[in-house]
Amino acid sequence: MEIKIEQPTGNVRANFVRVLPNDPRYQRMTGSERARNDRMPLFRGTISSPDEPDVLHEYAIWPYLGKEGKVFFAGPVRLLSTRAGVEDHLEAAARMSAEDAAKIDPDKVDPEASEIYENPYELNPGTIIMRVNNAKILKSDPAFPALDEAAREINANRPLYWLKWQREAGEKEVRGSLWDRSGRYGPFLSGNTQYPLTREEAQALSKPDQAASSSPKRGRGAKPEQQQAADMSR
């Protein structure tokens, strides 16, 4: 049963920036081109809050290793009117240190209310953090071809990323989700933002449906989406 979330929503979009090592274009790069590429954010985009959906902010994210070596993505957020370029983001002081990143548990970045999942590390104001939704089965996953039609529909409705946006001091925390899309100029991400959900709402959104539970079990080892995140961090 679909759960209706009765609250305002904002918007979030992203375009990929960095060329990943498994991309043929990466293999054709010179050493200096690879060095510059590897400094780039994985992707950058725009985001708005639920109460001001037309006021756009711009963000860019890089990969980090959190608790237990779990990969997550984070970066600075600023008003779009500043027209920040990639180089401006590269110089942003909001990029966190490896020591600070190691304090973050990516599994606690989801739509649920923060008072339920408290994080010992508070993000700096103007920071966004994302993680891969481990319930999403990618098309590259060996288990995907065996999904029946009902399970595929359920899986398609699951977002690829969860996000948390720490705004300025005193402002309400924002959560959100992103889905992978195909566009005229290649793949991109789009979704929405909202305020933290109650435990019941969050569980209803992330609980696997009975149709999905009939899908085949993955083999041992990292899930494909976890491997994708690991590939991004290289």
Image (cartoon, rainbow, N blue to C red):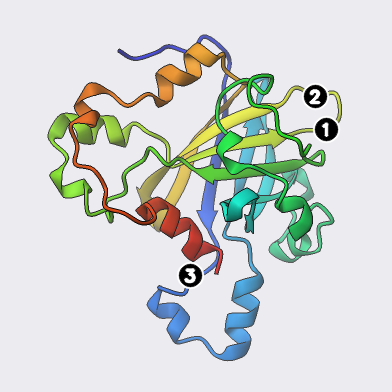
Element under disc 1:
loop
Residue 61, x across and y down, in percent: 64, 54
**Left or right: where 215 falls relative to 176:** left
Q: Can residue 125 be seen at all in this image of the molecule?
A: yes
| Local crowd size for mark 2, using a 10 Å CA cut-off: few (<14), some (14–19), many (≥20) | few
* Residue 171 vertical placement versus 126 (above, below): above
Q: Amino acid at mark 3?
A: Leu
Query: What is the crowding at mark 3: few (fewer than 14 residues within 10 Å), some, or many (at least 20)?
Result: some
Q: Residue at x 34, y 14 (%)?
A: 2
Q: Position of residue 34 (x, y in %)?
A: 58, 81
**Dots 1 and 3: beta carbons under 8 Å?**
no
Q: Residue at x 57, y 60 (%)?
A: 42
Residue 167, picture quadrant: top right
Q: Nearer the viewer, residue 183 or 158?
A: 158
Q: Secondary structure at mark 3?
A: loop
Going by the numbered disc 2, the residue's amino acid type is Glu
Judge whether residue 95 can be spotted in this image. no
Pick the quarter of the image with the N terminus: top left
> Number of marks in the image?
3
Q: Quadrant of residue 153?
A: top left
Calculate the distance from the C-alpha at mark 3 to the C-alpha at mark 2.
35 Å
Q: Identify residue for label 2.
A: 171
In this rendering, is residue 150 above or below 144?
above
First in residue order: circle 1 vs circle 3: 3
Q: Earlier in the sequence, mark 3 or mark 2?
A: 3
- Indicate left or right for 75 with 134 as reference: right
- What is the CA distance from the residue labelled 1 to the residue labelled 3? 32 Å
Q: Which residue is mark 1?
A: 168
Residue at the spot x=23%, y=43% of the render? Answer: 217
The residue beneath circle 3 is 20
The answer to the question of whether label 1 and label 2 lie on touching residues, with beta carbons closer than 8 A, is: yes
Seen from the viewer's position, the closer of residues 192 and 225 is 225
